[in-house]
Amino acid sequence: MTTPPSARMRFHVDGWDPAYGSTMEDSGEATTVAESTARIDAAVEVPVENWTPVAPGAPAQEPSAVVFVDGVRRIEARVWIPDDAGTTASMGVAASYAAGAVCCCSSGGAHVLVAEHRRGLFTTDAHTTDVTTRAGDFRAHHVAHDEAESPAVTLSAALQRELLSLELITAAAARAAVTGHCAEADTDLLVIDGPLRSRDHLPRALGFIKTHRAIYLPPELNAVVGRLEAGERTPVFLMGTSWDRYAWYLRLPCRPGSPWVGVVRVECAANLPAAQAVELASLSQRLLPPYASVEYKDPRAPQNLVPIAGLERQLRRRLGDQKVVYRALQVAAAAS
């Protein structure tokens, strides 16, 4: 049903290409790795004085299927929503996002299990309504104003929360789909691209972190990371920030380079017995390195695992052509 012109919400599309941000937002981003204030218990697997690289060994039991979960987001346009008087306007972000899961198993190779995509309009304006365009409906998401943050940061965080929520829905759907398809119940493994936060209740799940924004280990233990060979990992440690999890660093196969080249951090839930966390760490050494990407295929190699890279391409296609979506928003804005 078409919304009558008189009932349409008024908004304007920012003239800047969204890839360059907005004409009004903070431009600086932290690019250095910061010291962390996280609580660390490094004696989970071995005493601190015995910390050395751990060579790969045979895990207790390999999963019947490995399911990789990831999501993508894209800002289609930044918009401005004027008040009734037309004297002030609130910032908004029109975005598309998608999440999916790809299954790697012996019966079907690598194949997409489930994929979902959404469009949303995120704004601090409490009166914003859904926006209908030829490229689909942008659902209104009202975000509380934060005096301590710029609107761009606040809206980006809200978009990320919705993406994480969609990833959680996707992970649950993927787990249901894989059971009976190629895996018996409770024999699969979920590998979620990104931290496990808010998803650590999922059984048999690993968080896979490609980038390092903080130094969590003390210098003498951090030096062990630099000595890792391909396929080796650090001992498991317990890490606490606003939430707790077990973690370890793993080096994927890669060309020689800096001390941290090819290094990823892997996480599992803190409510597991320590012995089970160590088993998952050993399992990650056997399972993840064969999926490492290579430089001539992926600029984020080797950390962007091949199944995750393929899933990202599939999800981005589902978002549609960005120019078409942007033009659809412009047409809808003109009609408002």
Image (tube, helix red, strand yellow):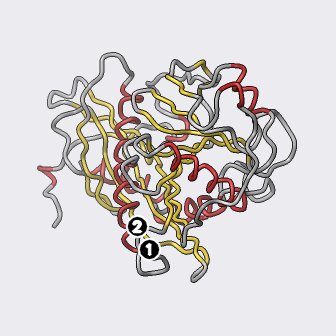
Q: Is residue 140 above or below residue 176?
A: above
Name the residue rendered at 36%, 67% in the picture.
Answer: 173
Tell me the quarter of the image containing the N terminus: bottom left
Task: Indicate the position of residue 277 as horizontal and vertical percent values.
Answer: 53, 47
Residue at the spot of label 1: 178
Query: Which residue lies at the image location 82% right of the left edge and 34% below the top edge?
Result: 258
Marks 2 & 1, CB-CB < 8 Å contact: yes
Relative to 318, say whether 255 is above or below.
Answer: above
Q: Quadrant of residue 92?
A: top left
Q: Residue at x 30, y 48 (%)?
A: 334
- 142 or 61: nearer the viewer: 61
Tag 1: amino acid: Val
Image coordinates for residue 53, horizontal then vertical, percent: 75, 39
- Residue 40 in which image quadrant: top right
102 relative position to 98: left or right = right
Q: Residue furthest right?
A: 256
- What amino acid does circle 2 point to? Arg
Report whether 268 appears left or right of 141: right
Under circle 2, the secondary element is helix
Residue tagged 2? 175
In front here: 33 or 205? 205
Q: Residue at x 39, y 64 (%)?
A: 116
Give coordinates of residue 145: x percent, y percent.
Answer: 26, 25
Q: Position of residue 240 (x, y in %)?
A: 46, 28
Mark 1 surroundings within 10 Å by alpha-carbon count, few (fewer than 14), some (14 through 19), many (20 or more)? many
Instruction: Give the Cα distance between marks 2 and 1.
Output: 5 Å
Q: Secondary structure at mark 1?
A: helix
